[in-house]
Amino acid sequence: MRDLTITIDGPAGSGKSSVARRVASILGYLYLDSGAMYRALALKALNQSVPLDDEGRLERLARDTHIQLKPPTPHQERAGAKNRVFLDGIEVTDAIRTADVAQASSRLATIAVVRQVLVAEQQCAGAGGGVVMEGRDIGTVVFPDAELKIFLDASPEVRAERRWKEHQEKGDAVTLSEVLEEVRQRDQRDRERKVSPLVRAPDAILVDNSAMDIEETARLILMLVRERQSEAAAVVAK
Ligand code: CDP
Ligand code: CDP
């Protein structure tokens, strides 16, 4: 069977990381969370007090930063992590999952030169196929020729509640309405920015998983994978 490039884009809390990781693990593909790269760079900018609108400094920061994504340890996985993230060799898996870093990442993600650096790294990491990459612009910009593109969505209320439950489990003191507001603000910025906004690629399949769990969503995507693989096999056989 041919190894496909699968892209999953969608707003915050739509289930991209959980579903992408599950699909990748069943297929034996590489799973790549592009959002973790924006978050890691945002954490570095916050730590170094680099203003989030200083394009020149942020571009240099992006070029001088080494971000690595690795599979989580069993302990981290039980705690809900979908991958391990290293920033210049130091683990930041938990540190990038705060509301401050989320907001900062979506501000930094509006800067074209920063995106260029991260997109080039994502293209390198996913070259060769056999990969499930998730984010906001993976099907539109990073891998526009991917064989299977999914646009994953769910209602804002469902997405905020999912995120709020994660905060509850970690013991973060945050209310559901605060999380809903954070998610709404970030979605709006991601959808309205000039460079690589969050949009559904014309050839992406819309999957609304408001009423589906991770397993059901992954199974639906796996059915689409099999369909693409048999279409590709039929073309080769002709
Ligand atoms: O990556 P993204 O922000 O799109 O979402 P996620 O981090 O994969 O999922 C956010 C939370 O929603 C996680 O705690 C998932 O376990 C949960 N989730 C769910 O309950 N049902 C789904 N169909 C998808 C995700
Ligand atoms: O997990 P969640 O869906 O909340 O966010 P994320 O995937 O970790 O991404 C954090 C932020 O990075 C998003 O709000 C976007 O602003 C930005 N991002 C992006 O612009 N392009 C991507 N391919 C991935 C993330």
Image (cartoon, rainbow, N blue to C red):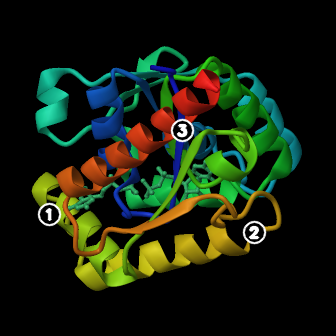
Q: Secondary structure at mark 1?
A: helix
Quarter assignment of residue 24? top left
> Which residue is situated farthest in the front direction here?
238
Comparing labels 1 and 2, the label whose residue is closer to the camera = 2
- Pointer 2 residue Cβ closer than 8 Å to ligand 2: yes
Q: Amino acid at mark 3?
A: Glu
Q: Quarter containing ligand 1?
A: bottom left
Q: Secondary structure at mark 3?
A: helix
In the image, 90: left or right of 28? right
Disc 3 or 1, which lies upstream in sequence? 1
Residue at x-position 54% and y-position 70% = 186
Look at mark 3 in the image and give the residue it sits on.
231
In the image, 117: left or right of 155? right
Look at mark 2 in the image and give the residue it sits on.
193
Look at mark 1 in the image and give the residue it sits on.
168
Disc 1 or 2, which lies upstream in sequence? 1
Comparing labels 3 and 2, the label whose residue is closer to the camera = 3
Residue at x-position 18% and y-position 32% = 77
Residue at x-position 65% and y-position 30% = 122
| Marks 1 & 2, CB-CB < 8 Å contact | no
Q: Amino acid at mark 2?
A: Arg
**Can I make out residue 33 in this image?**
no
In this view, 171 is above or below 113: below
The answer for how far apart the CA atoms under marks 3 and 1 are is 44 Å
Along the line of sight, which residue is nearer the eye, 26 or 138? Answer: 26
Quarter assignment of residue 23? top left
- Total numbered badges shown on the rendered structure: 3
In this view, 175 is above or below 74: below
> Which percent across, then down, holds residue 109?
68, 53
